[in-house]
Amino acid sequence: MKKPATFELRLYVAGQSAKSLAAFANLRRICETHLAGQYRIEVIDLLKTPALAAGDQILAVPTLVRRLPEPIKKIIGDLSNEERVLVGLDVQPVTV
Amino acid sequence: MKKNMHPAVTPALRKSPTGIIGLDEITGGGLPTGRPTLVCGSAGCGKTMLAMEFIVRGAVESGEPGVFMMFEENEAELTANVRSLGFDLDRLVKQKMIALDHVHIERSEIEETGEYDLEGLFIRLGYAIDAIGAKRVVLDTVEALFAGLPNHAILRAELRRLFRWLKNRGMTAIITGERGEGNAITRYGLEEYVADCVITLDHRVTEQISTRRLRVLKYRGSAHGTNEYPFLIGERGFSVLPITSLKLDHAAPAERLSTGVARLDEMLGGKGVFRGSSVLVSGAPGTGKSSIGAKFADAACRRGERALLFAYEESSAQILRNMRSIGMDLAPWVKKGLLQIHASRPTLSGLEQHLVAMHDTVRAFRPAVVVVDPISNLTLERSEAEEKPTLMRLIDLLKRQQITALFTSLTTSGSGTSALEDSQVGMSSLMDAWLLLRNVEFNGERNRTLHVLKARGMAHSNQVREFVLSDAGIDLVDVVLSEDRVLTGTARVAQAAHERYATEVRREDHERKLRQLGARRKAIEAQVAALIAAGEAEEAEVKFAIAQEALHEKSTQQNSVALAERRGGAKSVHRPTKGKR
């Protein structure tokens, strides 16, 4: 874990719903805290690009997909529980 | 609130045909248009197949594009599975008549945290629907989501929303579901959300033979058949046995068909059986049932009609060979395409499955005559309650298409008399004519007899005939009766000879008696003549005496007149004598 891979994250949302906005805010906060400088977030609004939903097998919204490092991981929900998001992303929490 | 919605939808319920043989008949036209239908059943009972046919036939036959969203199989698997049934999914997908979407969720990949909904699923489905302008949607098996998503409360709420959403979009949808434990229709209670139409599929094994059955459990706002109907996933896909059968309203043509055996036709009112009727030929082993069946088919081919022979005992090659031995060559008919022989093992599947298979074959071949040899093998070890409705369906199916059917049936007891008939009672009430073949063992040999037990709507012979199979073919010969016994075979021949001799003797005797009588008559006549002659002689003598006397009297008178004249004044004496004369 000394040379951590870049986290390539994709957040699927549907419009500007409360859950979507909450998820994005939560994700930014968690990443800044624990993965500063090692991550890239791509937000995909399925209302605009519905064709992309099938590609990552998206059902639930919001869904966070960890595309890199492999294997692919998915976290569904508004990411309000930081601990579980970290477990889901397989990220060692940075202890302050 | 939900209930109030329905009456307002449409006054007359519109239906979308599934294109599945039989199912549209049961449902009176198909599934409710613009509403979801729940199809549930245990694993491997054909849910996916039914749903797939609904989509494919909808696209091909009704011109309605459809979305097939699958949660278990993937596109490649599904395409491969249905290709064997002759559906080319790839082509339909390219033509934008069908959209396939495989929804896959791996529980292990998913972590859940906080609030979410299934908007992603809605978006995907909506996108697929819009892409091809779909009218039909299948969700196969949406319950897989319960395994993938831990929060069932959210899932249930979302499914409820999904079904309502489908309805609002006017999608005619099939949602499949796994059968639940015990009496539950589905494992996760989907029937609570999809309440318009519920169809259950079942796959049961009885007596080691499996039978698939379908039942329309519920169809809101529409009449439907409520029975269980056997169905088959065959070469041409899903087919449910049509059931309008129990109606008894088929036409009854007066046309008669020859059975192929002239003497048998003679026994059946001289013209054979009615077209569209069903004939049962029952008998012990080796009584010649198959031969009669084959002859019946042969006769149809001779008339230029198509005949279909279902054989459950012999292979088709064996039938051809065996029938050749009694001077019947069926091979040319097979070559000409007039005769089809379908030989299969009766234990291959249940009676219902055989029936559906028969139905499919009959539909494809359109024969005028169907021979089932023997029907008893199919009904083997079946309770009558179970077998009778099924047979009724078969007979009805044939009757409605005015196909004349001949069923042979093997009776269990060998040469018993009443037991033999008893064993067939259940079946016979469905039959229009019943020929009974019997073995008669007497005088060191066994011979076959045939009689017509019943023949509805025609004057038929009450006589027992001997049934003779030879290389010249099938023939019926009058039996000889002697002292309350029916004589057949050599005994018949011997008895006939005996009777011929006896007749001869009697004839001689009669002639002799006649001759005697003639002689006596001649003697009497001679006597009569003599008597008459004697009488005549007597008469002549009497007449002579009278004449003599008269002459004498006359001469006496003349003498007396002369004497009186001589004596004078004799006028007074003369006159009275003259007056007397």
Image (cartoon, rainbow, N blue to C red):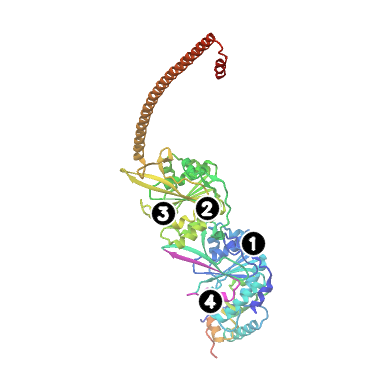
**Are there few (<14), some (14-19), or many (20+) residues within 10 Å of tag 3?**
some
**Residue B505 found in image quarter:** top left
Q: Chain of mark 3?
A: B
The reply to whether discs 2 and 1 touch (Cβ–Cβ < 8 Å) is no
Name the residue carrying label 1: B97
Q: Is B191 inside the magenta-drawn segment? A: yes
Q: Is residue B299 visible?
A: yes
Name the residue carrying label 3: B421
Q: Is residue A60 visible?
A: no
Name the residue carrying label 2: B361
Image quarter hosting the N terminus of chain B: bottom right
Circle 3 SS class:
helix
Whether labels 2 and 3 belong to a single chain: the reply is yes
Name the residue carrying label 4: B188
Q: Nearer the viewer, mark 4 or mark 3?
A: 3
Q: Chain of mark 2?
A: B
Q: Of marks 2 and 4, which one's residue comes earlier in the chain?
A: 4
The CA span between labels 4 and 1 is 32 Å
Q: Amino acid at mark 1?
A: Met
**Residue B7 found in image quarter:** bottom right
